Amino acid sequence: MRKYVSLFLFWSLMAMLVTGIVLFIMPHGRVAYWTGWTLLGLDKDQWQSLHIVFGILMLIFGFWHLYLNWRPFVKYVKEKLSPANPAVITTLVSLVLLVMAVKYIPPINYLLEFQEKIKNSWVKPTTPPPVPHAELMPLRDIAMRLGMRPRDAVELLRQHGLEVPSGQISLKEVAKLNGKRPSEVYQILIQASQNRK
């Protein structure tokens, strides 16, 4: 049983490492969703799902590992309290890191500022969304914001070769159905509304 627990813990750790790096560098949600950002064929939500699932597995197998190794763990903790005690050192280092992260203290804040630079370095959409998370709005609401009747917007997108079941589905769903980004679908609508003026 120990072999299985150790191997599951190892693979969960590897998955957490990879997904953690991706979450560290991925663009902010508003950019990722609007531009249809993906990495290795997975979008923002899929990377987050993987991170959560393997994080839960890591917790389960971590506690199971602790259960199987309870006696050595207790022995580490019970060692004579001294500055060289591993339990004291690891607890103090963890607490210091926790405070530094919460209080945004150097050098932790440098790491977080670096992350922000990476997240902001992704390509910005050429056509910004009309409102935050516009990709989640129903097509009919987007059309009305552009001064179009919802059925005209649906018809226009169909004329451009897009599959649009109705004006009730979100811009994101229309984009996904047609292998496009929400910003590209919105751009078609903007051009049409500008041509009508």
Image (cartoon, rainbow, N blue to C red):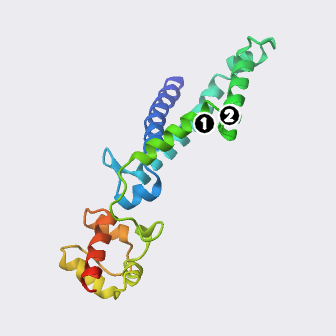
Foreground pick, 158 / 71: 158
Give percent across and percent down for residue 96: 71, 29
Amino acid type, callout 2: Met
| Mark 2 to mark 1 CA distance (whole Å) | 8 Å
Foreground pick, 79 / 37: 37
Q: Earlier in the sequence, mark 2 or mark 1?
A: 2
Amino acid type, callout 1: Asn
Give percent across and percent down for residue 154: 28, 82
132 displayed left or right of 62: left
State the SS at label 2: helix
73 displayed left or right of 194: right
14 displayed left or right of 94: left
**Disc 2 designates what residue?**
100
Residue lying farthest right? Answer: 81
For marks 2 and 1, give the one nearer the viewer: 1
Which quarter of the picture shows residue 34?
bottom left
> What residue is at 72 percent from the left and 16 percent from the top?
76
| Label of residue 83 in the image | none
Give percent across and percent down for residue 19: 44, 40
| Quarter of the image that includes the C terminus | bottom left
> What residue is at 81 percent from the left and 14 percent from the top?
81
Dot 1 alpha-carbon crowd within 10 angstroms: few under 14, some 14 to 19, many 20 or more: some
Which quarter of the picture shows residue 18?
top left
Q: Are marks 2 and 1 in contact (CB under 8 Å)?
A: yes
Question: In the picture shown, does residue 102 fall above or below 129?
Answer: above
> What residue is at 77 percent from the left and 13 percent from the top?
83
**Disc 1 designates what residue?**
109
State the SS at label 1: helix
